[in-house]
Image (cartoon, coloured by chain):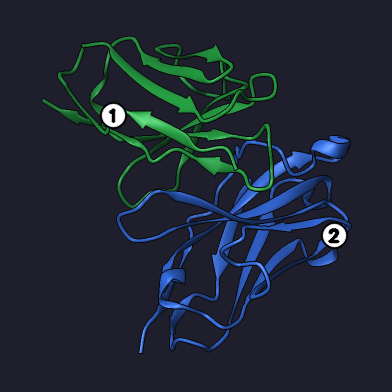
Amino acid sequence: EIVLTQSPGTLSLSPGERATLSCRASQSLSSTFLAWYQQKPAQAPRLLIYGASNRATGIPDRFSGSGSGTDFTLTISRLEPEDFAVYYCQQYGSSPPLTFGGGTKVEIK
Amino acid sequence: EVQLVESGGGLVQPGRSLRLSCAASGFTFDDYAMHWVRQAPGKGLEWVSAISWNSGSIGYADSVKGRFTMSRDNAKKSLYLQMNSLRAEDTALYYCTKGAPRGSGGRWGDWYFDLWGRGTLVTVSS
């Protein structure tokens, strides 16, 4: 089973600042089968990024993903008020099981 | 409208059973693999199970293997999760999600989730 470790656990930033979230896999992922999701309180997760760097439909270009192998990054170039949420990474290169990271909470400083 | 709507959750005693359902609309249901993902209160996401478009392949997390059974009825555009021998640690919000398209071959279970339902809450407690 591939374990995904997300860091930091919590990121305290102000609107307009840049957010950099990390996701590290316990073993190298096949190709770039990594996705990122955003989850707000009392809502289902929303797909942001798939294939490590491809934005999902309707996702603003301030969200970008990068990385390969075991190290992946989600960057939010300029935080908008609606971006404060919990973010999860998910690997889909080796299943079962599909696995998620533990999440990074981006909170308002 | 493209959506997934889960139902069937509730409060159940340990050791009892519950059957969840998920109704799909707005897309060609039998063109996609489907998954269940759960989230315990205040915790992260955990993949539970997956089923291929034609029910030919089904996979489970070790934590539910032998207790949960996933199925689908393409004619009814519906997904199901039969949960037996429920434990306190099964308490969670259960999401139905859309997975790989038909034609993904051997990668039917290896996919991301671009459509989620709102979830149905299962509480296992005496």
Chain at tag 1: A
Residue of label 2: B55
**Relative to B93, B42 lies left or right:** left
Measure the C-alpha gap from mark 2 to mark 1.
39 Å
Element under label 1? helix
Chain at tag 2: B
| CB under 8 Å between discs 2 and 1 | no
Q: Any mark on residue A82, and which? A: 1
Residue A66's x, y, as percent?
51, 12
Q: Amino acid at mark 2?
A: Ser
Residue B126's x, y, as percent?
35, 90
Residue B4's x, y, as percent?
60, 55
Q: Is residue B37 above or below residue A67?
A: below
Q: Amino acid at mark 1?
A: Glu
**Relative to A81, A74 lies left or right:** right
Give the colour of chain A.
green
Q: Is residue A93 above or below residue A14?
A: below
Give the colour of chain B.
blue
Q: Residue at x 52, y 80 (%)?
A: B86
